[in-house]
Structure formats: structure tokens, C-alpha cells
Amino acid sequence: MKKTSLILACLALLVSVATLIFTLLSREKKPVETEPIDGQTAVAGDIVYIQIDSLLMNYDMYNDLMSAFQSKYQASQDELQKKSRQLENDAKSFENQINKGLLTRSAAEQQQQNLLKRQENLQNEANNKQLELQEEQFVLNNQVYDAVKTFLEKYNQEHQFALILTTNTSTNTVIEGSKILDITEEVTRGLNEEYIRNRNK
């Protein structure tokens, strides 16, 4: 009888302990905040990220350099198209003169050589211009990259983040992250302020 009572008491104790453990484990955990709380920002030691597409779209230096580059590119294209149209018109005029028998054989050969030479020169000019513009765009991108990198080096001396990542729509280095860790807006604002100061010197 005493043995049975002891077993029942032990069972009751085990059930109460199991119930307590189950209750503690099944309590709802508060969801992790993914949106920034008012005034809350990343702190020293955090891994933060920059949305580079957004930064470039709103970076005055990049926009100014790209605007100048696009103007130069368009002027170059317009000039090449003008020369190409002129060459095409001269070639049609030459063909018309040939068909009407208005040129001697030697004059026709001379004009044909001139047209072929102009076509070759125009092709070389187009190739050289393309290489020149590619080089300019490469330098432009390096100027922007250097400005951003230099700014971030100074910026992180103050904030002491463990790591600063960049992400964009094509690579998605950061697929998902807390908005608190997104420093794009603050960095863009700082870059623009620095650019305006240097531009006005």
C-alpha cells in the first residue's frame, strides 16, 4: 500500500514537472523586430549594408559625371551618324554618275578608292571613339568608387561597424536584412554634403 502511494506520488511529481517544462517551452516568443524603431540605428560591431543602386541614383557626383558622359556620348554618336549619312549620300551620287555614264574609268576608280578610304577611316574613328568612351566610363566608375570608399573609411572610424556590405538588384548580396542595418540613406546624405562642399571650393 505504501509502495503504491509512493509510486503515485512520484508519477504526480513527474507529471507536474513535465507540465511546467512544457509550459515554459511553449510560451510564445516575441517576434524579432525587422523594422526600425523610432530613433533606433545600427551600433558599433554591427554588420551593415548599403543598397548601391539606390546610393548611385541619389549621389550627386555620380549623376553629374554621368550626365556629362552621356552628353559627350550623344555628341559623338551624332557626329558619326552625320559622317555616315554623308558617306552614304556620296556613294549613291557616285553610283548614279556611273549608271549615267558621266565618269571616265580612271575618274570612277579614283572616286571609288576615295569612298572606300573614307569608309575605312569612318570605321576606325567609330572604333577609336568607342574605346575612348569605354575608358572614360571606366575612369568615371573608379572616381565614384574611390569617393565612396574614402568616405566610408572616415565614416566607419566614427561608427566602428564590423562590416559594411553592398547589395544591388542583380547580385543580392543581402537578400533580407533589418532596416536598422541599412545605412544607404545616411551614407548618401553624407556623400552629397561632402561633394557639394568640395565642388564649391
Image (cartoon, rainbow, N blue to C red):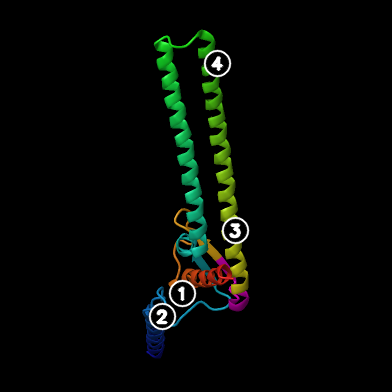
Q: Which residue is nearer to you in this view: 170 or 78? A: 78
Q: CA distance from mark 1 to mark 3?
A: 29 Å
Q: Amino acid at mark 1?
A: Ile
| Circles 3 and 2: CB atoms closer than 8 Å | no
SS label for mark 4: helix
Work out whether mark 4 precedes mark 3 in sequence or the reverse, and give the earlier one. 4
Q: Secondary structure at mark 1?
A: helix
Cα separation, mark 1 vs mark 2, equals 8 Å
Q: Which residue is mark 2?
A: 37
Which residue is painted at 48% across and 78% down in the image?
41
For discs 1 and 3, the disc positioned in front in the rendered view? 3
Q: Position of residue 162 (x, y in %)?
A: 60, 72
Check if mark 1's residue and mark 3's residue have beta carbons within 8 Å: no
Q: Which residue is mark 4?
A: 110
- Label 1: which residue? 180
Observer-nearest of 54 and 116: 116
**SS at badge 2:** loop
- Does 100 lie within the magenta span? no
Question: Which mark, residue 143?
Answer: 3
Q: How many residues crowd mark 4 within 10 Å: few (<14), some (14–19), many (20+)?
A: few
Amino acid type, label 4: Gln
Amino acid bearing label 3? Gln
CA distance for labels 4 and 3: 49 Å
Q: Which residues are magenta?
A: 156-164
Q: Residues within 10 Å of mark 1 (few under 14, many from 20)?
A: some
Residue 57 position in % (x across, y down): 45, 61
